[in-house]
Image (tube, helix red, strand yellow):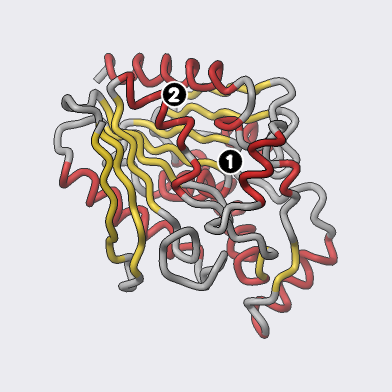
């Protein structure tokens, strides 16, 4: 196993941190992972441990304002910043591993970013995998909070309004405890501008979902309280791809890669990837 890390420049010059895990031999495919809100790429050890021994390379980076990357914690002025940064990182990965199939993996808000990217970028990736993707606003966010977010987004954009429930991350209490005590995880509230940008991005995806034509695997826990599984169903129904699969996992919480039953999730994902690598 070869692990490397470093930094690259985001679209506006911000320093962003990345990590690569590569097998000793040429990888049969590379998984480019986009993490969720508040967390960082270093939390995907379970995915690395499963897929690296099976010959896959894994590449991830910390979103701006997250983990070891620069930026205001848990914040950006424009959702398009995330999408543009992803495009730069994709180019970096492809330049180092030419002629290797590249798959885009997006979890939670990373799934929002990956879906938004896929609406307008059909080249570069051979397939899209969404895990607990945030594709519709959480049901427990009051209407008054959404109204306040839109108002404050203009006048006090960095105001915190909504705090994620850490207990909803995973049914594994050890995962929750590690999440809460991880110094690289942003524990503050979702800021007004960030919330509005996310809602607008989700609305854009729903309007333009038919433009997604990549092969897509959509995975979601049906007990997810942070990201409504109905959002995944909506994207599955509307995606323009003729090659699309929806997997719902009974009783699974938000981070399906960190649930006690994650081996089934990874096995399903591996089966899908193998089928699509063979079809290339």
Task: Name the residue beneath numbered marker 1.
Answer: 133
Residue 81 vs residue 208, the one in the foreground: 81
Give the answer, above or below, for where 113 lies relative to 27: below
Residue 180 vs residue 122, the one in the foreground: 180
Q: Is residue 162 left or right of residue 157?
A: right
Whether residues under marks 2 and 1 lie with C-beta atoms below 8 angstroms apart, the answer is no
Task: Name the residue beneath numbered marker 2.
Answer: 242
Q: Which mark is first along the chain, 1 or 2?
A: 1
Residue 52 vs residue 196, the one in the foreground: 52
Tell us which disc is closer to us: 2 or 1. 1
Q: Quadrant of the C terminus?
A: top left
Give the answer, above or below, for where 118 lies relative to 128: below
Could you tell me which secondary element the residue under label 1 belongs to?
loop
| Residue at 42 percent of width and 14 percent of height | 271
Q: Is residue 255 left or right of residue 222?
A: left
| Residue at 33 percent of width and 68 percent of height | 15
Expressed as whole percent of the image width and height from the top left, the position of residue 159 reads 69, 76
Question: In the rendered image, which quarter is residue 163 located in?
Answer: bottom right
Q: Quadrant of the N terminus?
A: top left
Expressed as whole percent of the image width and height from the top left, the position of residue 278 reads 27, 14
Question: In the rendered image, which quarter is residue 75 located in?
Answer: bottom right
> Does residue 42 show up?
yes
Expressed as whole percent of the image width and height from the top left, the position of residue 154 reads 65, 81
């Amino acid at each position: 196993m070869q692990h490397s890390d470093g930094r690259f420049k985001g679209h506006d010059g911000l320093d962003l941190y990345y990590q690569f895990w590569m097998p000793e031999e040429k990888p049969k495919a590379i998984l480019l992972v986009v993490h969720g809100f508040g967390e960082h790429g270093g939390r995907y050890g379970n995915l690395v441990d499963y897929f690296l021994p099976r010959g896959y390379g894994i590449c991830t980076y910390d979103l701006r304002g997250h983990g070891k990357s620069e930026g205001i914690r848990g914040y950006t002025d424009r959702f398009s910043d995330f999408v543009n940064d992803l495009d730069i990182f994709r180019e970096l990965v492809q330049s180092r591993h030419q002629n290797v199939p590249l798959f885009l993996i997006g979890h939670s808000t990373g799934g929002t970013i990956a879906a938004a990217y896929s609406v307008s970028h059909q080249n570069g990736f051979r397939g899209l995998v969404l895990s607990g993707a945030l594709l519709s606003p959480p049901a427990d966010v009051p209407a008054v909070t959404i109204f306040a977010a839109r108002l404050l987004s203009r006048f006090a954009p960095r105001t915190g309004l909504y705090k994620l429930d850490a207990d909803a991350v995973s049914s594994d209490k050890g995962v929750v405890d590690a999440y809460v005590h991880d110094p690289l995880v942003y524990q503050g509230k979702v800021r007004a501008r960030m919330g509005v940008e996310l809602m607008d991005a989700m609305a854009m995806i729903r309007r333009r979902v038919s433009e997604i034509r990549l092969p897509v695997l959509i995975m979601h826990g049906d007990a997810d309280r942070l990201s409504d599984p109905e959002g995944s169903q909506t994207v599955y129904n509307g995606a323009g791809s003729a090659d699309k699969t929806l997997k719902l996992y009974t009783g699974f919480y938000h981070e399906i890669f960190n649930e006690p039953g994650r081996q089934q999730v990874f096995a399903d994902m591996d089966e899908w990837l193998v089928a699509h690598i063979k079809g290339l």
